[in-house]
Image (spheres, helix red, strand yellow):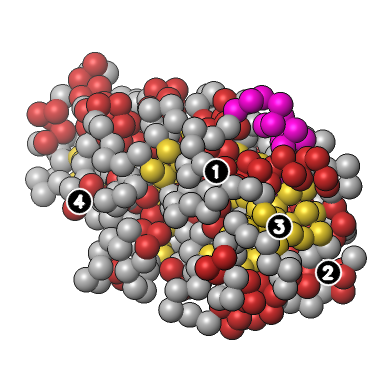
């Protein structure tokens, strides 16, 4: 589905008048006009009308009409990787000789913490490039693009119309992460797989930019970016926002936007779990499991039956001491909602007792399922001497200059340096039952410590995600035991036997 737009694009054929063209002559088919006049660079004769006259259109010519946005992050590992990717893409473009695209790193566009959620970045992107470009193409750090194939894909779509292109995913059932949107037929709504890349035409970008600037978003929360790159009752970012209740374009599926390599692919995907060297040693990762008395007999046995044996340093933190587990009581009463008081007590204990030995702190719930071997492989990519907050990134009030945070159920990973900076800052809980993950995010944002996202962390269960979603492969974590056998989930999705895991 597309829609005509954009006054600047639509009136472009009127520029012919300034070159001595007569629209009347055009309509009456006087072809000598084209023989003796030069068309503007972005206007070509694309056909004949019913009267034999010329039909003029805006033609997408080359890579110089494309703005490529790599969804980079501020952490030094990610920034360095994306700078190299940008360099290689520009070198490839120069060799092709079909124009040079504008290649941007998302984290460098502004100081706005919310740019990762795309919508806050759109007004600036359009203001800087909307008059000279035809397409904005967004890609994950790990996406590989064949520029010549991308050019062929984009050339199929009239650039004066609104287009939203991507590899189509859909939910098989109504899911909590999408706030049960389209519950009557979840498969009817498509959203892009970010690993394959996705594109919007400039006319669509213009309209979205105007909406972002002048409309109040319905929700403060940003949860699932691909789905929201359209609007749910709880979150409104990209796919639902674009769809706009049926008033905007639906996602157009593009078969050349791929994950696995195949013929004619314009994009492919590597992995969210890069090989940065041997995994971090077990002794360098301290695991803190938050639990309470009522779950000692229900949830803790699942941890012990699945992933506890992969931990080198681990403690259970509860509201009571239970020697059979054993648990540590931090003197903080259990709360029925947020656990900020308990989490900050864990941070202080880690710094006091374990920081000299461990480089990393992992805080999980007692119903978190996690692959510690995969996590330790991922952590090799990061420097514990840098302040790192790693996990599944959510956002609050990002359009209004809010903050990001790593969601607690998926697991929150902090470097020793991040813990040090947090505790020395004095930033903390406004109450013991405040949401710990959000308070940590607010504090780190105030300290200018970037929240680093990896899609392999999951706040929900495997069945809550689209089956083809790339982040399910080599997943690091899932959350919740609702209506499922957590031991089976662990064995199916998180357990693997790599000899390096025993280090």
Q: CA distance from mark 1 to mark 3?
A: 17 Å
* Residue assigned mark 4: 245
Which quarter of the picture shows residue 189? bottom left
* Residue assigned mark 1: 340
Name the residue: 59% across, 76% down: 297
Q: Earlier in the sequence, mark 3 or mark 2?
A: 3
Tell me, yes or no, whether the two marked residues, 1 and 2, touch with CB atoms within 8 Å.
no
Classify mark 4: residues with Cα within 10 Å, few (<14), some (14-19) or many (20+). Answer: few
Is residue 379 found inside the magenta-colored segment of the image?
no
Disc nearest the viewer among 3 and 2:
3
Which numbered dot is residue 328? Answer: 3
Residue 336: image x %, image y %? 44, 55
Label 2: which secondary element: helix
Q: Which span is picked out in magenta?
A: 413-427
Disc nearest the viewer among 1 and 4:
1
Question: Is residue 417 shown to the viewer in this render?
Answer: yes
Question: Is residue 260 shown to the viewer in this render?
Answer: no
Q: CA distance from mark 1 to mark 4?
A: 37 Å
Between residue 411 and residue 206, name the one nearer to us. Answer: 411
Disc nearest the viewer among 1 and 2:
1
Between residue 404 and residue 439, name the one nearer to us. Answer: 439
Secondary structure mostly taken by the magenta-highlighted segment of the chain: helix
Q: Earlier in the sequence, mark 1 or mark 3?
A: 3
């Amino acid at each position: 589905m597309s829609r005509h737009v954009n006054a600047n694009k639509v009136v472009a054929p009127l520029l012919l008048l300034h070159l001595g063209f007569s629209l009347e002559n055009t309509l009456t088919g006087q072809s000598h006009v084209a023989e003796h006049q030069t068309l503007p660079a972005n206007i070509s004769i694309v056909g004949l009308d019913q009267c034999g006259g010329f039909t003029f259109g805006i033609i997408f010519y080359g890579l110089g009409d494309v703005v490529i946005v790599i969804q980079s992050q501020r952490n030094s590992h990610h920034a360095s990787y994306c700078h190299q990717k940008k360099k290689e893409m520009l070198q490839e473009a120069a060799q092709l000789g079909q124009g040079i695209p504008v290649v941007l790193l998302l984290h460098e566009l502004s100081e706005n913490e919310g740019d990762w959620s795309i919508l806050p970045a759109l007004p600036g992107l359009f203001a800087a490039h909307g008059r000279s470009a035809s397409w904005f193409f967004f890609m994950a750090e790990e996406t590989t693009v064949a520029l010549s194939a991308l050019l062929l894909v984009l050339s199929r779509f009239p650039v004066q119309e609104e287009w939203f292109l991507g590899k189509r995913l859909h939910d098989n059932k109504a899911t909590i992460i999408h706030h049960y949107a389209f519950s009557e037929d979840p498969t009817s709504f498509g959203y892009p797989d970010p690993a394959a890349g996705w594109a919007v035409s400039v006319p669509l970008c213009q309209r979205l930019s105007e909406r972002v600037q002048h409309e109040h978003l319905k929700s403060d929360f940003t949860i699932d970016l691909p789905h929201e790159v359209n609007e749910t009752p709880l979150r409104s970012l990209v796919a639902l926002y674009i769809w706009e209740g049926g008033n905007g374009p639906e996602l157009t599926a593009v078969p050349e936007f791929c994950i696995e390599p195949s013929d004619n692919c314009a994009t492919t995907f590597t992995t969210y779990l890069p090989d940065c060297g041997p995994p971090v040693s077990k002794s360098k990762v301290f695991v803190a499991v938050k639990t309470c008395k009522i779950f000692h007999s229900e949830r803790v046995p699942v941890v012990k039956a699945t992933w506890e044996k992969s931990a080198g340093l681990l403690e259970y933190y509860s509201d009571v001491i239970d020697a059979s587990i054993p648990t540590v009581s931090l003197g903080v009463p259990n709360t029925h909602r947020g656990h900020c008081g308990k989490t900050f007590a864990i941070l202080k204990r880690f710094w006091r007792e374990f920081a000299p030995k461990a480089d990393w702190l992992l805080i999980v719930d007692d119903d978190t399922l996690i692959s510690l071997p995969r996590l330790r492989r991922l952590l090799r990519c990061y420097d514990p001497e840098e302040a790192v907050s790693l996990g599944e990134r959510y956002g609050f009030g990002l359009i209004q200059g809010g903050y990001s945070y790593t969601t607690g159920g998926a697991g929150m990973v902090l470097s020793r340096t991040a813990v040090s900076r947090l505790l020395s800052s004095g930033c903390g809980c406004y109450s013991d039952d405040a949401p710990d993950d959000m308070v940590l995010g607010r504090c780190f944002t105030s300290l200018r410590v970037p929240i680093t996202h990896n899609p392999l962390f999951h706040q929900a269960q495997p069945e809550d995600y689209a089956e083809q979603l790339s982040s399910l492969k080599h997943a690091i974590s899932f959350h919740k035991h609702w209506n499922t056998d957590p031991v089976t989930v662990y064995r199916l999705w998180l357990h693997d036997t790599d000899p390096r895991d025993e280090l």
